[in-house]
Image: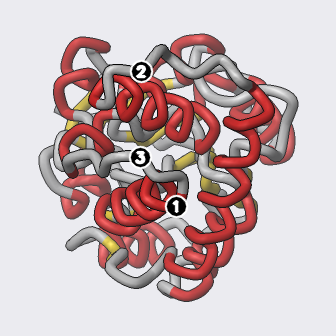
């Protein structure tokens, strides 16, 4: 199954869609917990908290660590902000220790760019914008995108459509001509909130929530993007 028309804007999530950043995020969360004397969490637990931005990730990790320690859920916002700052600074230094581009991503982006050189593509992630742009630069992805917006680029984060609507306006297209590519329910809900088309990536970090969100289209591998998008 594929699109019946050529899209005029492609917007990609980052973590779990373009890059496999799972281990660096897990390691950074656990380094933050250890710094504050908290028990480390399993890789699966931390991964399940990824997708709603760094602040939510840190808050969820701290809450889980408190449960393990049989302590009350933390409500000290100042402490959470301090822990978030520590996490972000640590992650900035370790953001590409283990992170890689998913197989098929570069080839698919090259295929799309070669066949449709004027088609705008962009990144919209809930990750803070600085590490998002730096990761794309280091891993050779920046050349494909006219914009890269993060979770602190706007007053809101996905699934609020503010970021996606901004990209739609900057590209001079309509929501119905736009495809949001992502691996979680957050990306599907972002697309749905403004009438864009959603393309789910089942190879990412949250296949269970993705399936429940029922994206318009799905792929099991990044190499399928050009075919499903009608851009092969």
Asked if residue 52 can be seen in this view, the reply is yes
63 or 179: which is nearer to us? Answer: 63
Question: Residue 36: x, y in percent?
Answer: 54, 52
Q: Which residue is mark 1?
A: 35
From what the image shows, is residue 123 above or below residue 193? below
Mark 1 neighbour density, 10 Å: few (under 14) some (14–19) many (20 or more):
few
Mark sitting on residue 156: none
Could you give the CA–CA distance between mark 2 and mark 1, rounded to whole angstroms? 17 Å
Mark 2 neighbour density, 10 Å: few (under 14) some (14–19) many (20 or more):
few
N-term-proximal mark, 2 vs 3: 3
Question: Residue 175: x, y in percent?
Answer: 66, 24
Question: Residue 18: x, y in percent?
Answer: 40, 61
Q: Which residue is mark 3?
A: 38
Question: Residue 76: x, y in percent?
Answer: 71, 24
Could you give the CA–CA distance between mark 2 and mark 3, rounded to whole angstroms? 11 Å
From what the image shows, is residue 40 above or below residue 52? below
Q: Which residue is mark 2?
A: 71
């Amino acid at each position: 199954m594929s699109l019946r028309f050529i899209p005029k804007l492609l917007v990609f999530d980052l973590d779990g869609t373009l890059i496999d950043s799972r281990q660096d995020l897990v390691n950074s969360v656990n380094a933050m917990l250890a710094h504050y004397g908290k028990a480390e969490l399993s890789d699966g637990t931390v991964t399940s908290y990824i997708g709603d931005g760094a602040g939510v990730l840190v808050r969820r990790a701290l809450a889980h660590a408190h449960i393990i320690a049989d302590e009350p859920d933390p409500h000290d916002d100042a402490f959470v902000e301090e822990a978030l700052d520590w996490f972000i600074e640590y992650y900035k230094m370790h953001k590409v220790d283990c992170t890689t581009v998913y197989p098929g991503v570069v080839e698919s982006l090259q295929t799309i760019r070669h066949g449709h050189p004027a088609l705008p593509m962009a990144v919209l992630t809930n990750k803070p914008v600085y590490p998002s742009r730096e990761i794309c630069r280091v891993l050779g992805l920046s050349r494909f995108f006219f914009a890269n917006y993060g979770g602190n680029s706007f007053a809101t984060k996905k699934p609020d459509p503010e970021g996606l609507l901004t990209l739609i306006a900057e590209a001079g297209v309509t929501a119905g001509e736009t495809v949001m590519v992502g691996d979680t329910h957050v990306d599907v809900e972002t697309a749905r909130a403004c009438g864009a088309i959603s393309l789910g990536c089942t190879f990412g970090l949250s296949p269970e929530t993705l399936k429940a969100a029922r994206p318009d289209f799905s792929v099991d591998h990044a190499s399928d993007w050009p075919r499903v998008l009608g851009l092969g």
